[in-house]
Amino acid sequence: MRTPILETERLLLRPLTSADAGAAFHNWSGDREATKYMRWELHQTVEDARAWLAREEKNVMSDTAYNWGFVLKTAGELIGSGGLFYTRKHDMMELGYILARSQWKQGLATEAARSIVEFANHTLRLSQLFCCHAVENTASGNVMRKVGFVYQNDGMYSSFDGKRMFRCKEYVLRFADAEPPC
């Protein structure tokens, strides 16, 4: 299924394109602090961001990956990204997200995550989702719990290049058991 456009009170979630490279690089993908706990490597240049976004454009029709850019409606500014991707290790879709540091602590990650979770439940009709956060990244854990994820156990995840390992907290959201998020 084509990645659809989703809308929340303050955000427009839309498929990313190569044209977003400059905004993505300057707002989050080239920010060492924002990307600290991400599986992918910090983008060193706008061209790194463009190469990533070219891959994302190819996945727009995928049934195993849905990735959105988060656009602030009031400013029209691209401030983050996130989505769902299938993980073999857990045999389910995993939720992930990242925001520009200038947008932290405003409830925007929760707003975006809630919209993605609703898409997974009502459109994809998934029975469950996986999510995890680095132990030190407690703010991400707060987002997960606010949208209905339930802590399962401690675990580990590594960066895609295998050079960094993170102790993490693992969560699952089972839609049949979930209480509606507040």
Image: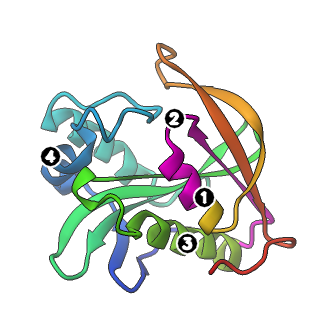
Question: Of helix, strand and loop, which one carries label 3?
Answer: helix
| Mark linked to residue 84 | none
Q: Identify the amino acid type marked 2.
A: Glu
Which badge, 2 or 4, is on the more N-terminal residue?
4
Q: Identify the amino acid type marked 3.
A: Arg
Q: Nearer the viewer, mark 1 or mark 4?
A: 1
Q: Nearer the viewer, residue 47 or 38?
A: 38
**CB atoms at circles 1 and 2 under 8 Å apart?**
no
Coordinates of residue 52 in the picture (x, y in percent): 32, 40
**CB atoms at circles 1 and 4 under 8 Å apart?**
no
Q: Give the residues drawn in magenta, as a range.
A: 125-144
Q: Nearer the viewer, mark 3 or mark 1?
A: 1
| Mark linked to residue 114 | 3
Coordinates of residue 23 in the picture (x, y in percent): 16, 53
| Mark linked to residue 26 | 4
Q: Identify the amino acid type marked 4.
A: His
Which badge, 3 or 4, is on the more N-terminal residue?
4
In the picture, residue 38 is in which quadrant?
Answer: top left
Q: Residue at x 48, y 51 (%)?
A: 139
> Distance between the Cα atoms at labels 1 and 2?
14 Å
What residue does disc 1 label?
A: 144
Say few, some or many: other residues with alpha carbon within 10 Å of mark 2 (under 14 / 14 to 19 / 20 or more). Answer: few
**CB atoms at circles 2 and 4 under 8 Å apart?**
no
